[in-house]
Image (cartoon, rainbow, N blue to C red):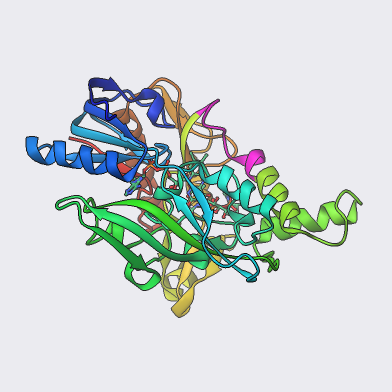
């Protein structure tokens, strides 16, 4: 039975712990409840905001209309049990990291590099979550969604989703048009490990040499390694409020890179498709002198300069700090930083 509440504080529904209030709020645990909520909002002509785990949003104002928290459960194997390819259907409300652990236990491999990313499965396609050399798009089969305006149910393929680095159709033309209800993933009974990411490779090499890790690396070991690396640098949102990386890593031309490298020979950069280069925004923010600073109840994390943290500030304080960081990085390096989480601001 759908329970729509009024004037609900969202502090515990966003990992930045920002103070914001939903005019109306409900949790939906099934497609039917979701359709009911959408019809209710449509009838009242209210705007709709979707919320999963709230780990990639900056709530810089109150939210007018209906906030729908997606809690649709379910993990099922949809391919034949004896097939090596494992297609699994995941309800949008499943916790992402618990899903990763569940798949590893079942012997369905492929998500190990994406361990410990906060949030729910339904939000994973929005920015095409990625970490340690793997992106959701590498393991994606299709998704099920409902059109907000009409309630029509649709299925979208890999091509339909237009995935890119921290990007998808849902951040472009499809923005605020659909609610994702289930994600279908393509995993495998055969491990196919991705160990190229420098920090992951170094971690595993060091542990293997020290005899801590056996020479035969398993998906579970990769997952444990990713968790250990992440815990060493990323703040746990339950202890220090944050939304992970606050800026995307900027992608520049090889000419701009060469010019910058003359002045900054240690500039961290990675090859991108099409000859373009990706810079490490954390390095740029640190070199611009921001690492560890605090101001007006918000700050820059002292282990990872790409992570902005909230001690007791507001969304506006955070955006003001982000604006200062963007201006100083642009001034020093001539590089624009784009905010990664979705900003909600009146
Ligand atoms: P929310 O924050 O609730 O929502 C994000 C956006 O998606 C909102 O615009 C919302 O409206 C929309 N949305 C949510 N659910 C749905 C749905 N079912 N249908 C349609 N739209 C929806 N991200 C990475 O990619 N890689 C990382 O390594 C990573 N590390 C992180 C580490 C920390 C400590 C934190 C706090 C965050 C990190 N993130 C990372 C960002 C975040 O975890 C991901 O973006 C995650 O997918 C967000 O999920 P969520 O359920 O919390 O989404
Ligand atoms: N670096 C610094 N100073 C810092 C932070 C980083 O010099 O304060 C340097 C590191 O030394 C390293 C490079 O920057 O050489 C990259 O750092 P790291 O491996 O920590 O990764 P990142 O580029 O900062 C990205 C993602 C993370 C993801 C990791 C691992 C983006 C915006 N961020 O961070 O995703 O977990 O790689 O793949 O792409 C997120 O999106 O919220 C997120 C946490």
Q: In the rendering, at what x and y percent does residue 278 appear?
A: 48, 65
Residue 246 image-quadrant placement: top left
- The magenta region covers 230-240
Give the residue furthest to the right: 211
Q: Position of residue 99 (x, y in %)?
A: 56, 47
336 sits to left or right of 4: right
Identified at 11% across, 41% down, the residue is: 42
| Image point (22%, 36%), residue name | 345
Q: Is 137 left, or right, of 198 in this rendering?
A: left
For the stretch drawn in magenta, what is the main secondary structure?
Answer: loop
Quadrant of the image containing the N terminus? top left
Does residue 262 appear in this view? no
Residue 124 in sight from this viewpoint: yes
Image height check: is 214 above or below 161? above
- Considering depth in this image, is 253 or 236 the residue closer to the camera? 236
Question: As drawn, is 233 to the left or to the right of 119?
Answer: right
Residue shown at 14% from the left, 51% from the top: 149
Position in image of residue 223 (x %, y %): 68, 51
Question: What count of labels does the image hold?
Answer: 0
Q: Does the magenta-highlighted stretch encompass residue 233?
A: yes
Front-lying residue, 31 or 215? 31
Tell me if residue 119 comes above or below residue 266 in the rendering: above
Q: Please say whether residue 298 is one of the residues in the magenta stretch.
A: no
Q: Residue 275 in the image: x percent, y percent?
A: 47, 78
Q: Quadrant of the C terminus?
A: top left
Q: Residue at x 37, y 37 (%)?
A: 29
């Amino acid at each position: 039975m759908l329970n729509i509440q009024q004037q609900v504080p969202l502090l515990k529904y966003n990992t930045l712990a920002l103070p914001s209030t939903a005019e109306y709020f409900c949790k939906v645990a099934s497609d039917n409840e979701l359709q009911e909520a959408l019809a209710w909002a449509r009838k009242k002509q209210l705007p709709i905001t979707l919320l999963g785990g709230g780990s990639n949003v900056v709530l810089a104002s109150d939210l007018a209309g209906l906030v729908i928290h997606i809690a649709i459960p379910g993990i099922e194997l949809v391919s034949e049990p004896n097939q090596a390819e494992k297609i699994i259907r995941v309800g949008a409300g499943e916790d992402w990291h618990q899903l990763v652990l569940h798949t590893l236990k079942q012997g369905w491999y492929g998500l190990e590099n994406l361990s410990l990313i906060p949030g729910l499965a339904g939000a994973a396609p929005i920015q095409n979550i990625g970490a340690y050399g793997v992106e959701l798009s590498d393991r994606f089969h299709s998704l099920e969604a409902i059109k907000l305006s009409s309630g029509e149910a649709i299925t979208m393929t890999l091509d339909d989703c237009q995935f890119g680095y921290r990007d998808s159709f849902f951040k472009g033309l499809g923005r605020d048009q659909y609610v994702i209800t289930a994600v279908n993933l393509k995993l495998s009974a055969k491990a196919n490990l991705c160990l190229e990411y420098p920090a992951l490779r170094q971690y595993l090499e060091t542990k293997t040499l020290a005899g801590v890790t056996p020479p035969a690396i398993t998906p579970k070991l990769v997952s444990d390694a990713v968790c250990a690396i992440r815990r060493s640098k990323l703040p746990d949102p339950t202890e220090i409020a944050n939304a992970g990386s606050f800026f995307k890593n900027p992608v520049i031309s090889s000419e701009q890179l060469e010019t910058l490298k003359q002045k900054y020979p240690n500039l961290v950069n990675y090859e991108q498709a099409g000859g373009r280069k990706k810079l490490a925004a954390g390095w740029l923010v640190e070199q611009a002198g921001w690492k560890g600073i605090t101001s007006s109840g918000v700050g820059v994390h002292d282990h990872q300069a790409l992570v902005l943290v909230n001690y007791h500030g507001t969304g506006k304080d955070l955006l003001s700090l982000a604006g200062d960081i963007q201006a100083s990085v642009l001034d020093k390096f001539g590089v624009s930083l784009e905010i990664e989480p979705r900003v909600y601001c009146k």
